[in-house]
Amino acid sequence: MTLADFYNRLNVDKSLAKITGYNPYYQTINSGLTGRMLVNGREMIDLASNNYLGLASDSRVIQAAIEGIHTYGVSLCGTPIATGYIDLYQRLEERLSRFVGLEDTVIFPSCYQANNGLFACVAGPQDLIVVDRLVHSSLIQGIKSSGSKIRPYLHNNFEHLEGILQKSRDFRQVFVVTESVFSTEGSIAPFKEILQLCDKYGALPIIDDSHGIGVLGNSGRGILEEQMIEGYRGIYTASLGKGLANAGGMISGDKKLIDYLKYYCSHLVYSTALTPAVLAGINAVLDIIYSEFGDIKRRLVAHQRQIYEALLEGGFNVVSGEAPINSIQTGSRETTFILAKKLYEEGILSTSFIEPAVPSNQGRVRLIASAGLSQETIDEAIRIIQKIGFL
Amino acid sequence: MESRVISTIQSVLDKRPIITLESRLIEDLLVDSLDKLMILSALEDEFAITISEDDFADIFTVNDMVEKLKEVI
């Protein structure tokens, strides 16, 4: 085996981009998320980012991040267990716990790391993990790393889940894993009903609320508020880089769990802590959510509905879930890239999903219309969508 | 056994074409790794057995799955 042999193995298959004349991945962005973003030097409408509330470029959030840097510098150059656990970090964990209504929280450098690290810490080969067929890769990879037996259930299919739980008696612990909002579909899990099943069969629920926190519920507190779930004793994870418009991830739950993760979860213990600017930025976003969520949510919902109706008029096969996501069912990989290319050529940046991010031949083009977009921008997006649909 | 295997696979694969013994798992039925796990789990329930995933690592068609099951049952 020579060095050349090694590098010859590392081939990225870019044939799809060649066939369709478009590669939606690693586009160069030359601006922040201001509604009209610069992509490869060209002004475009952002229907791709997860900036649901439109706060990623909010002046108050930027100012808070600057003040965070002034107070603490750009980094503490250490892991949370060493020098990275500044008082701002600790206060934000406490605040996030209160926000989602759970006892304790630990903040991770990303939600991918949180989901990836969680399972190996709390589960092992004696356990069973029952997981929705469509959960995010971070959960699947984390689950696989635990060595537990894995049984996927059909997406949001209550009967299939119960059938599996009925037959799963001989394990040390059974976990049931789902997301709140399935971001490629826009569907929301019937989590309250899933919890009833967990109670019935003694299973421990784990929910990833990455696309729900800051978005769902009357005051933006996520899936638990949305479905009026009180006294939740399972495990809760979420991204801080979507509705909360910054970066990082969190795990919340009982204090005993969080203490354990703080010492034994290597994805946390061996990663440099989130930076002061990000921690301060999240704090500022929470301030805004507490005071303005009602108005922001109304804009978000209105934008989603307007884009949805335009897609229907344009003849697209669109899934309308309860989440502020419009997901166009495109089928094959080629069709997915071609639609994303048409949108791009007309000035809309979208997100393309092909396998393995979604099941084979179930490609999606996702459009998220942030609450921060102006009505003028939404109107233009509608014109473009209708024009493409009628082509 | 063949019909039980086919109907078990059908129960966990929605939106797929008709399944026959000759169906190739990846090319015809678009089975990915999670689908395969769902199929193996459903077969465990159907035949009241425990399946080792490693035993089913090199199967390509539904018929391969039937033959492998005959070995372990």
Image (spheres, helix red, strand yellow):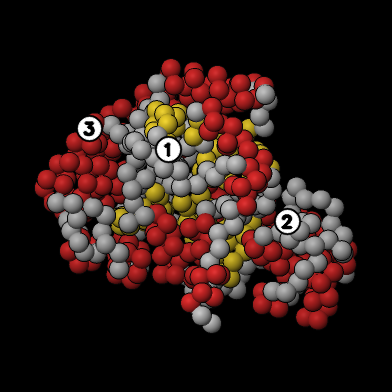
C-beta proximity under 8 Å, tags 2 and 3: no
Give the residue number, with chain letter if any, for mark 3.
A60
Q: Chain of mark 2?
A: B
Separation (CA) of disc 1 from disc 3: 28 Å
Q: Are marks 2 and 3 on the same chain?
A: no
Residue that numbered label 2 is attached to = B30
Mark sitting on residue A40: 1
The one of A214 and A14 positioned closer to us in this rendering: A14
In the figure, A32 relative to A374: above or below?
A: below
Q: Nearer the viewer, residue A101 or A334?
A: A334
Q: Residues within 10 Å of mark 1 (few under 14, many from 20)?
A: few
Q: Is residue A180 above or below residue A54?
A: below
Q: Does residue A239 lie above or below A60 as drawn?
A: below
Judge from the rendering whether residue A85 lies leftward or rightward of residue A319; answer left or right. Answer: left
Q: Position of residue A38 (x, y in %)?
A: 39, 33
Q: Residue at image x 29%, y 67%?
A: A269
